[in-house]
Amino acid sequence: MLAAAREASAPFIVTEMDAATGALLARNHWRTEGGDRTEFLGRNGTLDRPAALVGDAPLSNRVGAGFDPCGVLQTELELKPNGTAEIVFFLGEATTRAEALSLITRYRTADLDKVLRAVTEHWEDVLGTVRVKTPDRSMDILLNRWLLYQTLACRVWAQSAFYQASGACGFRDQLQDVMALTVSRPEIARAHLVQAAARQFVEGDGTALAEPRAPIPLADDGATHKVRVILG
């Protein structure tokens, strides 16, 4: 959470409890963009049998810096035979602490069923535009919804991949990725083409990896790819 590698980021993540909202906040000060994992798991504890779930003792609400960070919300629930219960919790990310608290306040007073319906309808619209049917059922599962969702959520919005967690845009790779969006979300595909074209030089090549918010280079000063870009 909050970084590409837990081992590298753990010393820089600081957790806190917000007194006004009761929210558990975590911030990676190294990246400048809860709680304690050891207490949750217990001494010599494991993920399949954490101390916080096995024992009766409540968590201490210990937060701060210098821990192996972990976000844990603990509650006690007693169900009668054939009974049901609904527990709702929020998990999100924001650029600043103030923005995070604003989102918490906003959604605590929102109609969550309505919000969920809106999110569901959005993804149905994005992922249901193109339907593929092949003799291979496993291929259909991948092509219908899943791969398109991964392209938009991971490659376009998160700007991430298996080996690329920097937040930058790969010139060649993500030009290929947005081809999947030309039918369901052509405006997103075109916006990325325009962004890529801004990183292309008169010779035809472009910067191999670029941070979208960084200044546009005036000359080729690093690794480049040569790709023909046509804007329609």
Image (cartoon, rainbow, N blue to C red):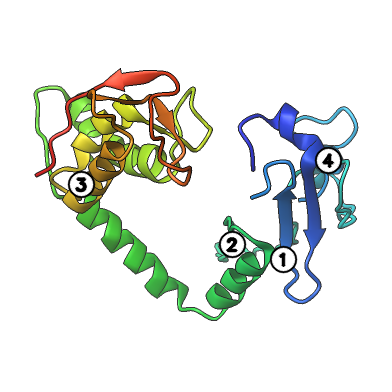
Judging depth in this view, the residue of 73 and 98 nearest the camera is 98
Closer mark to the observer between disc 3 and disc 2: 3
Q: Type of residue at label 2?
A: Phe
Asked if labels 1 and 3 touch by Cβ distance under 8 angstroms, the answer is no
> Mark 4 highlights which residue?
51
Q: Type of residue at label 4?
A: Ala
Asked if labels 2 and 1 touch by Cβ distance under 8 angstroms, the answer is yes
Q: Residue at x 76, y 51 (%)?
A: 34
Residue 92 occupies quadrant = bottom right
* Among the two numbered marks 3 and 2 on one chain, the one whose residue lies closer to the N terminus: 2
Q: Give me the C-alpha separation between circle 3 and circle 1.
A: 39 Å
Q: State which quarter of the image contains the N terminus.
A: top right
In the image, residue 93 above or below residue 161 = below
Q: Type of residue at label 1?
A: Ala
Would residue 14 be found to the left or right of residue 206 on screen? right
> Mark 3 highlights which residue?
190
Q: Secondary structure at mark 2?
A: loop
> Mark 2 highlights which residue?
90
Q: Residue at x 17, y 26 (%)?
A: 228
* Among the two numbered marks 3 and 4 on one chain, the one whose residue lies closer to the N terminus: 4
Q: Give me the C-alpha separation between circle 1 and circle 4.
A: 22 Å
Would residue 114 be found to the left or right of residue 20 on screen? left
Residue 220 occupies quadrant = top left
> Mark 1 highlights which residue?
23
Where residue 76 is drawn, which disc sits there?
none
Closer mark to the observer between disc 3 and disc 1: 3
Q: Secondary structure at mark 3?
A: helix
Q: Give me the C-alpha separation between circle 4 and circle 2.
A: 23 Å
Q: State which quarter of the image contains the C terminus.
A: top left
Percent coordinates x, y for residue 90 in the rendering: 59, 62
Percent coordinates x, y for residue 98 in the rendering: 66, 69
Closer mark to the observer between disc 3 and disc 4: 3
